[in-house]
Image (tube, rainbow, N blue to C red):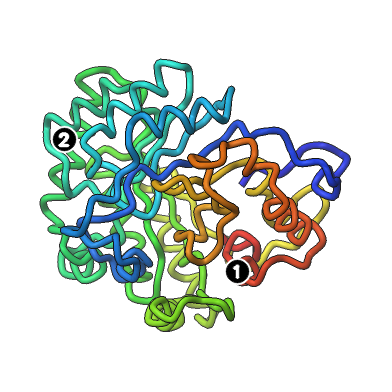
């Protein structure tokens, strides 16, 4: 999260902020896996073999052009982005315009050809989801995935990067829960063994506690409560984090761990500035506050494909949402979010 760097807190103004220079667009709204901690399993169109939930390439171009001069594009969402047959065309199109493009993938659908496409497209950053270092635990979390296949595909990307002398930044991303806390050092070691120098660890991002939560998401809420580390004794977390840091130091891996305690908010470091500095758009064009919300049926501000990017960005719904967040009276969906609480 990048805090606003102006001395004046412009979030309190009535005037909408300028169009953001950071945009996250969801190219695919479905996934080939059914990960335990992911809300997509409760979204009807997200089924692996269900109706295609893809953003058309022309609509992708319209959205990016609608935002104007953007610096960074995160081309991912709730689904697996590389399911899209034109995913690397999207990356190449944006990269050719000087936009820094990143994505997150489960790596299950990759091959040597896709690894090479990744390099050729100009992708800047690849986040590879890996929540365990042992096959059984990994496959119990990432249901439908095969650990050794994912590891092989990771090697393919690392090899393609090396062969091309590419600057591609590859990072392993781990969602930390009760069931995989003990594997943190092993995940760091795996990253080192596979030639990946960066591991990014985050907590479960949301507890789905808002009163307006659609009924189908309640099993997700129960899972998050079961696996959340919020009630974990601090000494156990400190011990696990210390072991992971020691392994990272030994392996020369850059390890990012989430905070052990909530960060206090100051004017210089707001809890969350997403609705001012960045936009999140679903594969259908729905504008949401951020990536933490996941699905537009929880909250959205309108459709940017139907009504235009700038019109929705400056809409009353968006402005009211910003005003509540700036005044410490955020929408219920924000109150238990890891970003808002300062523990992401």
Image location of residue 72, percent across then percent down:
51, 31
Q: Could you say which is closer to the camera, residue 135 or residue 197? A: 135
Q: Position of residue 85 (x, y in %)?
A: 21, 36
Q: Which quarter of the picture shows residue 56? A: top left
Residue 146, above or below 168: below
Give the side of residue 139 with respect to residue 182, left or right.
left
Residue 338 in sight here = yes
| Most foreground residue, 113 or 266 | 113
Instruction: Using residue 53 as the reference point, say whether residue 73 is left or right of it.
Output: right
Q: Residue at x 48, y 40 (%)?
A: 305
Q: Specify the label residue 333 is tagged with.
A: 1
Task: Please count the marks in the image.
Answer: 2
Q: Where is residue 40 shown, x and y percent of the image?
A: 34, 64
The reply, left or right, for residue 199 in relation to residue 196 is right
Q: Which mark is residue 239?
A: none
Discs 1/2, front: 1
198 with respect to 309 (left or right): left
Q: Quadrant of residue 240?
A: bottom left
Residue at (13%, 44%) from the top-left corner? 152
Q: Badges 1 and 2: C-beta atoms under 8 Å apart?
A: no
Residue 179 x/y as whole percent: 33, 75
N-term-proximal mark, 1 vs 2: 2
Local SS, label 2: helix
Q: Secondary structure at mark 1?
A: helix
Residue that lies at the very extreme toward the right in this rendered image: 8
Within 10 Å of disc 2 (Cα), the crowding (few <14, some 14-19, many 20+) is many
Residue beneath the point at 55% across and 53% down: 288
- Residue with the mark numbered 2: 156
């Amino acid at each position: 999260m990048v805090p606003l760097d102006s001395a004046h807190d412009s979030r309190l103004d009535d005037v909408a902020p300028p169009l953001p220079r950071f945009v996250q667009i969801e190219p695919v709204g479905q996934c080939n896996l059914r990960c335990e901690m992911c809300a997509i399993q409760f979204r009807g169109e997200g089924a692996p073999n269900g109706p295609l939930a893809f953003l058309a390439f022309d609509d992708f171009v319209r959205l990016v052009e609608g935002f104007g001069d953007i610096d960074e594009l995160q081309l991912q969402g709730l689904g697996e982005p590389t399911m899209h047959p034109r995913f690397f065309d999207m990356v190449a199109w944006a990269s050719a315009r000087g936009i820094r493009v990143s994505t997150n993938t489960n790596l299950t659908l990759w091959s040597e050809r896709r690894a090479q496409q990744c390099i050729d497209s100009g992708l800047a950053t690849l986040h590879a989801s890996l929540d365990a270092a042992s096959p059984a635990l990994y496959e119990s979390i990432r249901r439908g995935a095969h650990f050794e296949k994912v590891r092989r595909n990771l090697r393919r990307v690392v090899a393609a990067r090396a062969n091309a002398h590419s600057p591609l930044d590859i990072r392993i991303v781990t969602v930390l829960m009760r069931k995989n806390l003990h594997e943190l050092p092993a995940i760091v070691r795996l990253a080192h063994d596979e030639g990946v120098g960066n591991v990014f660890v985050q907590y479960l991002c949301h507890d789905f506690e808002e009163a307006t939560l659609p009924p189908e998401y309640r099993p997700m809420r129960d899972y998050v409560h079961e696996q959340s580390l919020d009630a974990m004794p601090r000494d156990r977390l400190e011990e696990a984090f210390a072991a992971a840091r020691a392994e990272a130091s030994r392996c020369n891996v850059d390890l990012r761990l989430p905070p052990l305690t909530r960060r206090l908010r100051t004017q210089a470091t707001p809890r969350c500035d997403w609705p001012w500095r960045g936009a999140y758009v679903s594969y259908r064009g729905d504008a949401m506050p951020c990536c933490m919300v996941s699905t537009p049926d929880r909250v959205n501000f309108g459709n940017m494909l139907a009504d235009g990017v700038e019109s929705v960005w400056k809409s009353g719904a968006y402005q009211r949402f910003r005003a509540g967040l700036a005044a410490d009276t955020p929408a219920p969906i924000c109150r238990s979010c890891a970003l808002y609480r300062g523990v992401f």
